[in-house]
């Protein structure tokens, strides 16, 4: 009997499916976070013409032979980060009635991986993740939220040694306009408040309280109120 493939060899299969099936503009594999590790994650636009709303989809990948309810519980735990959560399992046989019931009861989506293809068996309900964990996940995907238009946009490069904020200038509006970049700034008051309460303390007085403005808002809104060059 051939050995089942390693779990991580299934990740690209699931990632491709997530990209195509949900129309994700960004996907990632094996995303390690402080409290979790997500096998496959995707981000898609859901805001229509009038908003930049997005949805994060997280998938737990298995290759059979695991305690099913435990796997479902683990998958459900992704909803602290994501709006939709799926358990994708490699199997020839369909999910049993019990398994479908367990997944529906807990509120997770189910995907069958078979012959290199993914089939959505149950779709995931929509969840409201913990905002700070959701935004932190997005930042590891090089995405940030614009404080002006509320859209999610690319803030920098990926890869080792890359500048993760390369699409932004640091509190320099003129430079941002000239370079057609976005802007990054820090909120000192909020940082000070959290510092006082011992919530976020840095040794050197650095503030982590970063906020972003997208290149479009810089070019088409802020550029109009910036003083004209003589
Ligand atoms: Zn914007």
Image (tube, rainbow, N blue to C red):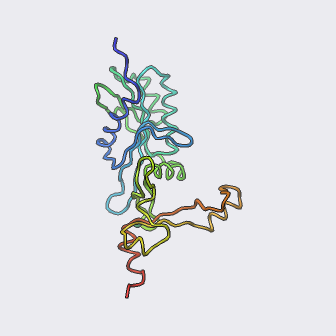
Q: Is residue 17 above or below residue 130?
A: above
Viewer-side residue, 62 vs 130: 62
Viewer-side residue, 27 vs 168: 168
Q: Point out residue 59 in the picture as x, y percentages from the top left corner.
A: 42, 37
Q: Quadrant of ligand 1?
A: bottom left
- Name the image quarter holding residue 50: bottom left
Q: Is residue 137 above or below residue 214?
A: above
Instruction: Name the image quarter holding the C terminus.
Output: bottom left
Q: Point out residue 207 in the picture as x, y percentages from the top left corner.
A: 60, 62
Viewer-side residue, 217 vs 201: 201
Which residue is located at x 29 percent, y 28 percent?
Answer: 116
**Left or right: 109 in relation to 199:** left
Q: Count the marks: how many?
A: 0
Instruction: Name the image quarter holding the N terminus.
Output: top left
**Left or right: 136 in relation to 188:** left
Q: Residue furthest bottom?
A: 230
Which residue is located at x 33 percent, y 50 percent?
Answer: 25
Q: Is residue 4 above or below residue 17?
A: above
Which residue is located at x 36 percent, y 50 percent?
Answer: 44
Q: Point out residue 87 in the picture as x, y percentages from the top left corner.
A: 42, 32
Q: Residue furthest top?
A: 1
Q: Point out residue 14 in the picture as x, y percentages from the top left corner.
A: 35, 35
Q: Is residue 99 above or below residue 42?
A: above
């Amino acid at each position: 009997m051939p050995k089942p493939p390693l779990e991580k060899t299934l990740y690209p299969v699931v990632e491709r499916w997530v990209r195509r099936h949900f129309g994700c503009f960004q996907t990632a594999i094996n995303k390690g976070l402080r409290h979790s590790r997500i096998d496959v994650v995707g981000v898609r636009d859901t805001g229509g013409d009038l908003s930049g709303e997005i949805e994060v989809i997280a998938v737990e990948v298995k290759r059979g032979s695991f305690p099913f309810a435990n796997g479902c519980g683990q998958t459900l735990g992704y909803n602290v980060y994501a709006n939709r959560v799926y358990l994708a399992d490699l199997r020839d046989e369909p999910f049993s009635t019990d398994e479908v019931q367990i997944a529906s009861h807990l509120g997770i989506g189910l995907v069958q991986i078979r012959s290199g293809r993914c089939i959505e068996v149950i779709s995931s309900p929509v969840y409201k993740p913990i905002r700070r964990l959701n935004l932190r996940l997005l930042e590891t995907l090089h995405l940030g939220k614009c404080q002006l238009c509320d859209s999610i946009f690319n803030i920098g490069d990926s890869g080792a040694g890359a500048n993760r904020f390369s699409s932004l200038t640091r509190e320099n509006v003129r430079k941002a306009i000239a370079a057609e970049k976005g802007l990054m700034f820090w909120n000192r008051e909020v940082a000070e408040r959290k510092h006082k309460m011992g919530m976020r303390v840095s040794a050197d007085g650095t503030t982590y309280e970063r906020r972003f403005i997208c290149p479009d808002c810089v070019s088409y809104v802020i550029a109009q109120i910036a003083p004209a060059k003589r």
